[in-house]
Image (cartoon, rainbow, N blue to C red):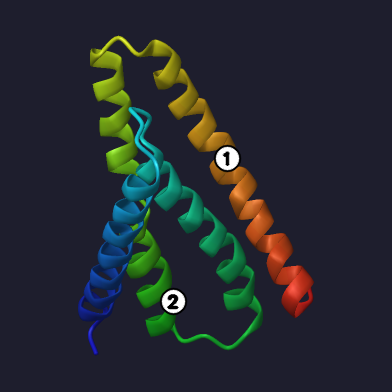
Amino acid sequence: MSNCLIVALGGALGAMARYGTSLGVIRLVESRAPLATWAANLVGCLLIGFLAPMADRLPMSEDMRLLIFVGFIGSYTTFSTFSLDTLLLWREGQIGLVLLNMVGSVVAGVVMVWVGMKLYEAILGS
């Protein structure tokens, strides 16, 4: 299968998962804060933190890496949506939420990658 088709398949799956995450968060929480975007980005960070060390230690084909990392996780996480949410909050004068979204997303994302790596180590060893 060509690389483009593999990435497209992973991207389609990631986009559907992203949509499902958004629907779930919106049903659970009503807020002006972009919590659905946060949820998708943090889950994506957790996934990449967990799966990256696994991909380094286990035999994983280039096709599988493209499917998971470039296609699925690349589509599931939403930096462009994060940027738009931040700009819309700025336009609304929600400067506190702008700062919280910008700093919080980066810090929480890095923490979730670290947690994913630690989960990998705890479950599957280092």
Position of residue 16 measured from the top left corner of the image (x, y, whole percent): 26, 66
Badge 1: how crowded within 10 Å, few (<14), some, or many (20+)? some
Q: Quadrant of the C terminus?
A: bottom right
What's the residue type where badge 2 is placed?
Arg
* Residue 5 in which image quadrant: bottom left
Position of residue 107 measured from the top left corner of the image (x, y, whole percent): 58, 35
| Residue 10 horizontal side relative to residue 104, left or right | left
Q: Give SS at disc 2.
A: helix
Look at mark 1 in the image and give the residue it sits on: 108
Q: Quadrant of the N terminus?
A: bottom left
- With respect to residue 7, does 100 lie above or below? above
Which circle's residue, 1 or 2, is located before the other in the chain? 2
Position of residue 22 measured from the top left corner of the image (x, y, whole percent): 31, 52
- With respect to residue 76, does 52 lie above or below? below
Look at mark 2 in the image and give the residue it sits on: 65
Residue positioned 46% across, 86% down in the render: 61
Q: Residue 4 carries which label?
A: none
Between the residue at mark 1 and the residue at mark 2, the CA separation in whole angstroms equals 24 Å
What's the residue type where badge 1 is placed?
Ala
Residue positioned 57% across, 76% down in the render: 55
Badge 2: how crowded within 10 Å, few (<14), some, or many (20+)? some
Q: Give SS at disc 1.
A: helix
**Label pair 1/2, CB-CB below 8 angstroms:** no
**Number of numbered markers:** 2
Position of residue 82 measured from the top left corner of the image (x, y, whole percent): 34, 37
* Residue 51 in which image quadrant: bottom right
| Residue 83 horizontal side relative to residue 50, left or right | left
